[in-house]
Amino acid sequence: MKKRKNKRTLKKRIKRAISLSAFITVVFISGVIIYLILMASKGFAAYQAEAVSYSIQQELNSGSAIKPLGISRIEEIDKNDLRTKMWIERLNQRTSINEFIPYMRDVNKIYISIEVKDKLVYSNEEEDLSGFSDFYKDTESIKPILDSNNKEIGKITVRVNTQFLLEIVIPLLVGIILLSLVALFISKILSMFLVIPIITPLKQLETKVKAIAEGDQETAANTQIILKRPLREMESLADSTNGIMKKLKGYSEILEVQKEVLENQNAELEVQNEELTESKLEIQKQQAQLIQSEKMASVGLLTAAITHEINTPIGAINSNAQLEEMVLSVILNHEAVQENDELIIMFSQLKEVNDVNLMACSRIIEIIKSLKSFSRLDQSEFQEASINEGIKSVLVLTNNLLKSRITVHEEYGDIPLVKCFPGQLNQVFMNIIVNASQAIEGDGGIFIKTYQKERFIYISIKDTGTGIKEEDILKVFEPGFTTKGVGIGLGLGLYISYNIIQSHSGEISVVSELGKGAEYIVKIPIDNERT
């Protein structure tokens, strides 16, 4: 794939940096000047409004305006009277302020309004179309009008015409903007001249290095970079590059030799690594199978010993207890005993004790039966077996782990017998149920469900334990993986279970969410052939 040409150059970057710095400087200075002009215009407007309002206030409050208006009191002023109109005309002439801005056209530069007793006597205000009236709002000057008793009877409001101020300010702002644009243009030209002494030596160096990169080893070793009138930094860079070129050929040869050696070593290591990986997997598999065989042999020997040692005496005890039950029933129903209350009480107590013995014998017999069913000593061949009965026998053996804190919910479906190694499948159920009980902290529940779907039997064992992290779900069936902490378990239970289910042409999977428990689903074919 052809490499895309890079259009970003150092020359453009430097020119942009100079232009940007000039732009920021010009914009900042222009902004400051514009701000000062606007503040000065507000100050000028406030000064003019204050001066005119004060002059009118003095004329009205001193009484000097009463005689020309032909009135005895200021509140008698009539804006329709001819003398009032002449006095107002004189006010208009006073507001032209031509002494300040002599070249401006003759317009109402200052708006004046006079109110007496809430009645507008005079106003020369016009509609403000400039949109800047709020900006100059605080320049307005308001003065009170007093009667002969120094009581306020009205007010004088004076403000500068906003449009008049804009006719002064806008030309100044336009001039500043034009000067800013001229300054930016000049900075653009200057940047072109400032870049030349930096870029020219770099372009020469780029041309030489590019030629070396495209040439052979001999050219790279013999080519020298020569710059005309370079800067000190450029000259140092050229000398260093020339030195690197001289050593390039020797380094290249050394690297080629080392590369060949490393490739050979890497190939050997890959072969050894593959062999070690295969050996490790084989050892783990054999180790798991050995542990499984030893476990089942140990359970078988233990069950055989228990069956041999306990079956005969427990059978005798159970027979004796049943015989005592029959004898005690006959005695309790005898007429001589029925007439003696003390004998009734005594034989009733003996019967209660005997009932407890019978219950204990029944429990022991059930446990021995479950042990035999779990290890399947009498069914060690590949044969048809009941999945439901196998799970029930496992629950009997694990009752000590579950009672008093874990409730088991059993939902057995109407499923057919399955061709299998019963003892091995019982070991799978045992591993999953024990793991579930250990995953539940405090009280909880285990939900067991069996059902048939097409030609497969499904066994679902779900718990309300701590669950499994998402990143660990794919590892649970690996040998040595455990979440039980150091010294608790070898991490082989689920690995052995996985291999057992695989040998039965089945599948085992887990669905879990951290903090919400885990569900193991075992899938076994009904018509399985021994493998």
Image (spheres, helix red, strand yellow):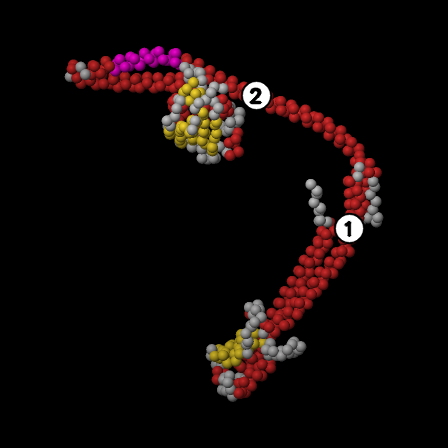
Do the residues under discs 2 and 1 have CB atoms within 8 angstroms? no
Q: Is residue 223 left or right of residue 158?
A: right
Q: How many marks?
A: 2
Closer-to-camera residue (167/280): 280
Q: Amino acid at mark 2?
A: Glu
The image quadrant that residue 253 belongs to is: top right
Q: Inspect the image, locate mark 1, and give the three-letter code of the amino acid beneath it.
A: Ile
Region in magenta:
306-325
Q: Main secondary structure of the magenta part?
A: helix
Q: Is residue 41 above or below residue 17?
A: below
Which residue is found at the position 41% from the left and 19% from the top? 384
Residue 335 lies within the magenta run: no
For mark 1, give the secondary structure: helix
Q: Dot 2 surroundings within 10 Å: few (below 14), some, or many (20 or more)?
A: few
Q: Position of residue 305 (x, y in %)?
A: 41, 13
Magenta stretch containing residue 323, yes or no?
yes
Q: Which residue is mark 2?
A: 282
Residue at horizontal 54%, vertical 74%?
A: 127
Residue 413, which numbered label?
A: none
